[in-house]
Image (spheres, coloured by chain):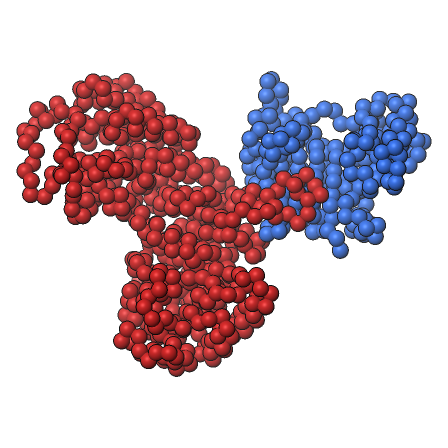
Chain colours: A red, B blue
Amino acid sequence: MFNYNQAYCYMTVHPLDPIFHPRAVAVVGVRTGPAAGMMGSFYDSLLETDFPAIGGLYPVNPKADEINGRRCYPTLLDTPDPVDHVISQVPASVVPELVDQCVQKKVRSIHFFTAGFSETGSQEMASVEKAMIKKLRDAGIRAIGPNCMGMYVPASRLAFMNGFPTEPGNVFLLSQSGANAGEIVHGLVSRGVRFSKAISYGNGADLRAHDFLDYAADDPETDVVTAYIEGVQDGRAFFDALKRCARKKPTIILKGGRTQSGSQAAHSHTGSLAGSIEIFDAACRQAGAMRAQTMDELHDLVVAATTNTRFIKGRGVALFGGGGGGFAVLSADAIDREGLTVPRMPKSAVDKMREYIPVAGSSVNNPIDAFPPEEHLEDMLRLVATAKGIDMFFMSPMTGWRQPPPGSKPAATGAGKSKAKKAKPAPVPAAELALTQEQKLENANKAADQMRSLEDDTGTPVIAVLRSGRMARMMGQSKSAMSEAGYRKGIGVYPSVARAARTVAQMLEWKAYRKGLPDIFKKG
Amino acid sequence: MKIKTVVKKARAEGRSLLSEVEAKEILHSAGVPVERTVLTTTVKDALAQADWIGYPVVLKIVSPDISHKSDIGGVKIGLKDRTAVRVAFNEILANAKKAAPKASITGIAVQHMAPPGTEVIIGVTTDAQFGPVVMFGLGGIMVEVMKDVVFRVVPVTERDARQMISEIKGKAILDGVRGQPPLDKTAITNAILKVSEFVLNNPEVLELDLNPMLVYPKGAVAVDARIVIAEE
């Protein structure tokens, strides 16, 4: 029988948790004119996610009575009770008045999209910011910002930009920059990733990186944490929170802005050698977190930490490509450059493959640059995946090859043996390359299923590397469809062999330096 | 000597840089392995200390105004007997007077000359964001040219210290190259941990260099030390 008392004992709610689940939201200073681009259309975004289906949504602007057919309130105090969360789009000069109203209205949290405070460098505005934060905190109200995009919480139907999915996921994002928060969400969503929460916190006048890291560490909806950070206001608190978070969950940090040496004085050798970037790197490494150097790396590492890429244990890559010797050579180089290897296949495997592909000019060693006939494909893939020294399988998704366009006759090749002799597919007329969106999705799903079953049968992680241009079209694929389809099957999908190899190498290095910390890359 | 006393004295004299003798004294009390160094002011005094420490010894100028001691001929090494000490003592004083006539000379430090070993550097600096951080690297040319150093935020754990040692690019040197025996990594680990503990307990320490620290197949010892303290 379910024991409520016992369940209650295990339930600890983080003090920040209520902020992510507001019962009602007021958008104060809501724009009444036509939508002005991506940034700042909070009201529209909340309509798009259908926030009103689960909570009150109150536009506030004294200049309008109605907006999109919904009642617009002149002030926050005129809105129905309760309002838990306020989004401030008012000018900085009006903020002090709004803060007083928030206190009176007893809201839980306020997000200041409003800019023009400490980030301007003005002493005066910095002290205004300080004073308003103090007033809010005294009233028990937490603030996000100023100068930021606020919260994206799919499960609570909160979104700060249009086009954010309402489907929740397991990745937590915090970002000092609003634009980069959008970039990371949109970029990762197209790779199949979904978010538990994403926060853009701007100036971090009240809530800042360490508060959110501390929350993310214990958030049951979050498995992987990623952050874009330019500078931390309180390095020690940040370091402690990062340590706590990274011990429990894969945590990936992208740091922007190379500043001058962080040391206060440099009378020593050590001081002269210590740059702020080196020390930031060291702090991340010490905490057990991973440093991404670029936006691409952040995307790839988040994909890796949430897919089969995190289970890869060794360095041996089987590369199954097709597309010519040149592609195989460059791919092998890219793999080698990252400290991974492309082991030769054992003779028994090579002999067996030769039976499948009796064609001169095709390479049946590793990298494997040949397409076996369809009926041998499954056997051959399994043979390669289980060969000695193979720790992972890189393959270009291959279903959809020579896919005929809708309504056309199947290619006039007889089934069976005669087809089997043809290792290379017949050229495809350009017109036939055009596939419908449905066909691309179907192909992607088929390829993802194929890779998933290969991995399940052999225990070797299967990584999908996408191809570009005509090659991708000949393979009947769309990159985004393949990214999503693979991701949903737990397959790491990367835009190129080089990026896949780099990501795997980084994951292996990360695991190595986490030795002695809890294993966060276990299966199950 | 207690660090509080040393810091108070330095601040009273308007110094933020502790003398080598002061730095080594307080590091020794904190359990950091340093080659102890004694301040002398006369030849007689220096001879007595050298006799007690045991030959060979090193003599070094101690002056708040002279930062780069060896550049002005303020350091004499490998002094094997009393005669050598006597000659070196007078030479150092003469060199210092010639190079920096206005420098105030505290005295001459006598220390035991450690046998040759592999040079490493252990240091501390205070980062504006993270506070005190410990640095480790190979000494000499590796630190000068290659900047082959790694950092960790204080407090450093044993796991961190071991990782620092294995993270430098030239780590093979510590494992013993060309038939050399491997060096005592445990001694380096302990020194890093002691330094971390020292700065954690003494927040007035802003910067610190143990440069070089000599590492042997058994044991390690810092032969020079430098400490910068925060102004009041």
Res A475 quadrant in image? top left
Left/right placement of residue A424 relative to residue B154 reads left
Residue A380 lies, in percent from the top left, at 21, 28
Above or below: residue B98 compared with residue A435: above
- Count of labels in the image: 0
Q: Quick check: A319 left or right of B94?
A: left
Where does the N terminus of chain B fall, quadrant-wise? Answer: top right
- Identified at 48% across, 41% down, the residue is A514
Do we see residue A99 in this rendering?
no
Where is residue A29 shown, x and y percent of the image? 40, 73
Quarter where residue B74 is shown: top right
Residue occupying the point 53% across, 65% down: A117
Quarter the C terminus of chain B occupies: bottom right
Q: Nearer the viewer, residue B223 or B217?
A: B223
Q: Is residue B81 above or below residue B4?
A: above
Which residue occupies 91% across, 29% down? B90
Nearer the observer, B88 or A513: B88
Q: Is residue A398 left or right of residue A172?
A: left
Where residue B168 appears, as percent x and y from the top left, is 57, 33
Tell me: residue A34, above or below residue B139: below
Viewer-nearest residue: B58 or A14:
B58
| Residue extending furthest toward the bottom | A78
- Tell me where residue A454 sits by quadrant: top left
Q: Residue at x 88, y 23 (%)?
A: B84
Q: Residue A156: x percent and y percent?
A: 34, 64
Report whether residue A329 is seen: yes
